[in-house]
Amino acid sequence: MLFYVFGVDLFTALAPCSQIDPSAIWGHAELSFHEEKSAAAQIAMLEKHGFRVARGLAEIATAFVGEIGDGGPVIAFLGEFDALAGLSQVAGVSEPQAAVEGGTGHGCGHNLLGTGSMLAAVALARYLKENRLPGTIRYYGCPGEEGGSGKTFMARAGVFADVDTALTWHPAPFNGVRSTNNLAVLEIYYRFKGVSAHASNSAHLGRSALDALELMNVGVNFLREHMPQDCRVHYAITDAGGKAANVVQARAEALYLVRAPQMPEALALAARIDKIAKGAAMMTETEVEIVFERAATNLLPNIALETAIHQNMVTLGPVPFDETDIAFAKEIQKTLTPEAISSSIRLYQIKGDVFATAVSTARPACISVSGISRGSRISAPARPMSAM
């Protein structure tokens, strides 16, 4: 992102002294809302470059903001840095190889998101100072992105209320500006409560919460035929009630994720799923508790900002990958099926460039080496945020 906004010279000059080594964040690999070491490393770098840092935003210990400059506009860069459970991975290896068996790891470049955005913030602050331009630059450390909806809580607390423009980025199969929508998502727990009994001697006295949960899942699967095609519903059984097969399970729980292009559609679909859950409870004479966990709105594109960034990217040309980069990308590419490659290209709606040929051959030149710039992202804000 920085490369395309300020050009090669400023990027080259700042990179060695302004960026945290992404391998350090990779090594920390801390789960959502527990990113203590990752947050501390970024805060130290911000303070080194003269940013005023506020910690504990929205009562989240690992949420913070660094600010420098004064006056308007207020330009923000958003960084993420949390990891995922069970994704431990040795760096520099093209195939899955756990560094710690069952350990945490970064699944989609979150070791890069914060460090890259922070470098952009430092560079823009330097640019404004050297050219005597007004403006306030902020870097927001946003924890809990991997299923935690950290920015939702930050938005609700008003930490973005006076931001004029916010930028973030993400690794992808291409280098460009993304101007497509992400689905809105709801996360809902369904907790069934029944009556335990011996499954052989007195099964008739039991009321199985696990039966209720399974009936709900079956009902939702039949619902799929009758819901909009661009919606998604997926779930995980988070509590099956126990490991003993000779007991009527008195409790069971599932976490459902309900996705739709717009939040009203997601809410309407969730209401239908609620009815299925209540019906399953009625059929089994159990009780169900429906617990709304969190939500995030669909991404809202900022066409004006995206167009400006795109024009800069076209002017400056592609990121200069060397032969080592390309060779490693090809090794990663070998681990992917042709269907996986072509599906990824379709997901990002890539048209009119080198990947156009790859759709038919399913052999793009490189995979997940570069990044994309997003001009707008909102996670369930208390009110709309300008220019995001």
Image (cartoon, rainbow, N blue to C red):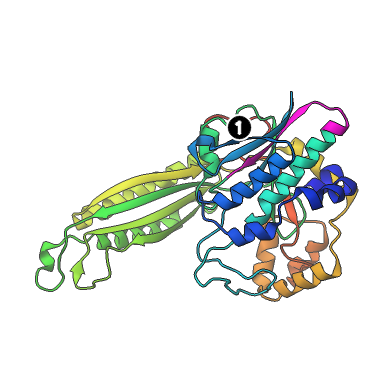
Magenta residue span? 129-142
Closer to us: 255 or 217: 255
Give residue 126's position: percent from left, percent from top: 82, 37
Q: Specify whether residue 132 is painted magenta.
A: yes
Q: Quadrant of the C terminus?
A: top right
Of 201 and 80, the residue lying toward us: 80
Task: Judge whether residue 197 can be spotted in this image.
Answer: yes
Q: Which one is in front, 226 or 94?
A: 94
> Residue 148: image x %, image y %?
50, 48
Determine the residue positioned at 57% across, 53% down.
82
Q: Residue at x 52, y 47 (%)?
A: 260
Query: Would residue 132 be found to the left or right of residue 225 on screen?
Result: right
Location of mark 1 (residue): 160
Q: Is residue 209 left or right of residue 87?
A: left
Instruction: From this view, report whether residue 194 is shown above or below residue 315.
Output: below
Identify which residue is drawn at 84% across, 62% down. 321
Q: Is residue 187 above or below residue 337?
A: above
Residue 50 location (% of width, % of height)? 73, 36
162 sits left or right of 314 in the view: left
